[in-house]
Image (tube, grey):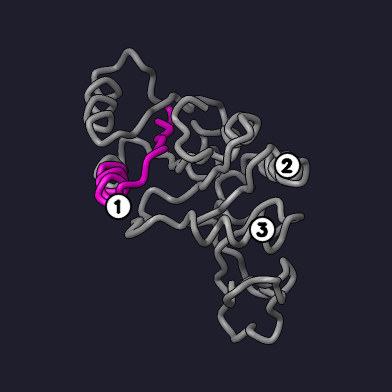
Amino acid sequence: HQAAVDNTVFVTFMNVRTISFALNWAAHLAKAKMGGGIVGFMNMRQDTSVFRGLSAKLSTLGVATFCAISPQAAISPQGGRWFHVIPLLLTGVRVILSDVDVVWLRSPLPYLRELEEAHPQMDFAISSDAQSPTDGRRILANSSRALDIEAFGACSVSLNVGVVAFAPSARAGAIKAIHEVERHLNSSIMLRRVDQGPINH
């Protein structure tokens, strides 16, 4: 909550294999003058030299860090990150969760604020992997411009959790959805599969 800027945090998760991605993610966040960055270190304790060194580098870019250690993250860092999302949501701030290989070129906040205003009942929004045109299923909004949003059932192929935007105020629908994600991933077989699997489920 203390890391939030404009009631928003930008969150990603990384492990020792994705350090360069995390630094690139943070560098672009800083270049775009977007505050509120947080990186969750998967399976890394704070007393390790890697954690201390990387945390110091990220701090110079204005990005906070925290430990994301759990049995699920030890089995699969990608799927295991879902078990560290609810504490972020419970702060009540807007949570923009992204893959560590996402690059932010400018702030999405003006768009997200307009989206939330046009769709006040929206709990969260997810980027889509639709492989066929779905424009005919767009949701019309009371907005000054097209927001290019579709209902959850419009994407019949697969969703893509590269970016998930959770509206602020710890909405019950978002928390319920992540609890469902955790239940879906509670078997190691599901946990080792693609991390967008539970969202599609």
Within 10 Å of the Cα at label 1, are there few (<14), some (14-19), or many (20+) other Cα atoms? few
Residue at 61%, 48% in the rendered image: 166
Residue at 63%, 48% in the rendered image: 167
Quadrant of the image for the C terminus? bottom right
Residue under pointer 1: 32
Left or right of residue 141: residue 54: left
Residue at 43%, 42% in the rendered image: 12
Disc 2 residue type?
Arg
Disc 3 residue type?
Glu
Residue at 25%, 36% in the rendered image: 61
- The magenta stretch spans residue 33: yes
Q: Position of residue 168 (x, y in %)?
A: 63, 42
Up-down relation of residue 69 to residue 190 (above or below): above
Disc 1 residue type?
Ala
Q: Secondary structure at mark 1?
A: loop
Up-down relation of residue 121 to residue 27 (above or below): below
Q: Secondary structure at mark 3?
A: helix
Residue under pointer 2: 171
Q: Is residue 186 visible?
A: no
Residue under pointer 3: 117
Of the two numbered discs 1 and 2 in the rendering, the one whose residue sits closer to the viewer: 1
Q: Is residue 193 visible?
A: yes
Q: Position of residue 163 (x, y in %)?
A: 50, 56
Within 10 Å of the Cα at label 2, are there few (<14), some (14-19), or many (20+) other Cα atoms? some
Q: Real-space Cα distance between discs 1 and 2?
A: 28 Å
Q: Which residues are magenta?
A: 22-43
